[in-house]
Image: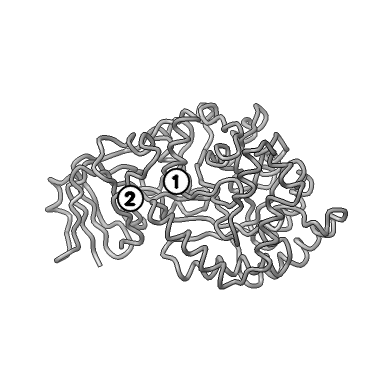
Amino acid sequence: MSLLIKNIKALAGIHPIDKLILKGSELNNLPTIENAFLLTVGDKIKSFGKMEEISAANIPNTPNEIDAKGKFVFPSFCDSHTHLVFAETRESEFVDKISGLSYEQIAAKGGGILNSAKKLSITSEEELVESALNRLQEVQSQGTGAIEIKSGYGLSIEAELKMLRVIRKLKTLSPLTIKSTFLGAHAVPFEYKNNRNEYIRIIIEEMMPRIADEGLADYCDVFCENGFYSPEETDKILQAGWKHNLKPKIHANQLAISGGVQAGVRNNAISVDHLENIGDKEIYILKKSNTIATMLPTAAFFLRLPYPPARRMIEENLSIALASDFNPGSSPSGRMSFVISLACIQMKMTPEEAINASTLNGAAAMELSNDFGSIAIGKRANLIITNEISSIANIPYFFGRDCINRVIVNGE
């Protein structure tokens, strides 16, 4: 199958094929071609350029055609942090938040992660697949083409394995490219409240070997926060994960400066995610590392937390990514266009910076930027075609709606 998109107002996100991540001021560069065409063959980008060059593009006979007059085309979003598999929503806790309870207070009375774990334990694998597949179809329609999904609402051997098997099933049912993360260290189950070392032993000695034997996860994550897992416990879990080829990704500094950034960098984490609370030491450590700083502004929005200091991070030449944190408790949305709007409105990122952080750098945070996140010959044909808009800035400007006309995944 071939697809020709022609008369594109502007083709955006054209980075060299070997440009796998953007740092600092590079993020503000979103290369474009005006009055452009793009040709896909199969699931790959075959060629692109200015419309006057189309005759030299070796177009196959009778391709499917899309006239994109007045429209922008850019790479699909790469959402590198979600908890998209869950049993039920938690809107009752939403009301608790409105009434003034903090995240920690809700968790202390059995809400939060433990609430989701309780509901998941009595939900069948088939029901979880069905509900998660609906969410995947929703985020695909909103422009996401590659996504990471975490476990962490199981908190027992069988329930964690159930979640990861659901994610494996989703990989076969959805056209999206999916990465899987083991997050057994999301919270400490109630029954291990006074014996947390035993639960950590179960994670390391019982869960990880079975996950590795079945090839169920790409990454290992830990919620390194006050009241959840300490930096020392995080080290122990992540180091065990490396032995099972589970590369580290980490929840860090959402609720306070917790030592999570240091633990992530110390263990060569692919990314440290959240960073609502971050200081000079953490920024310096990230600057000296290859770890990506992933920000989740919809979680800060929903929980009324401080937003990460994106401008400072960019000025310090960090590699930053944006993701949705789609989950039932603190970010019940996978709409990446709204993530971009918040990044611009609340974190003072330019539209170009926010789009790059949501595409190429999002792909890098899943180790997918060889194939996703930018317009380059040979990369996956995962594309967004906008409505007729005046500029790329319309995407964050119209924060209440998507400026999306069509989403192409794998060339279709």
The quadrant in which residue 312 appears is top right
What amino acid is labelled 2 in the image?
Ile
Q: Residue at x 50, y 41 (%)?
A: 321
Alpha carbons under labels 2 and 1: distance apart: 12 Å
Q: Which SS class for mark 1?
A: helix
Q: Earlier in the sequence, mark 2 or mark 1?
A: 1
Marks 2,1: beta carbons within 8 A: no
10 or 377: which is nearer to us? 10
204 or 289: which is nearer to us? 204
152 or 15: which is nearer to us? 152
Q: Position of residue 217 (x, y in %)?
A: 60, 63
Is 250 placed above or below 279 here? below
- Which residue matches tag 1? 336
110 or 82: which is nearer to us? 110
- Which residue matches tag 2? 384
Q: Position of residue 168 (x, y in %)?
A: 55, 68
Residue 344 lies left or right of residue 215; in this view the side is: left
Q: Which SS class for mark 2?
A: strand
The quadrant in which residue 64 appears is bottom left
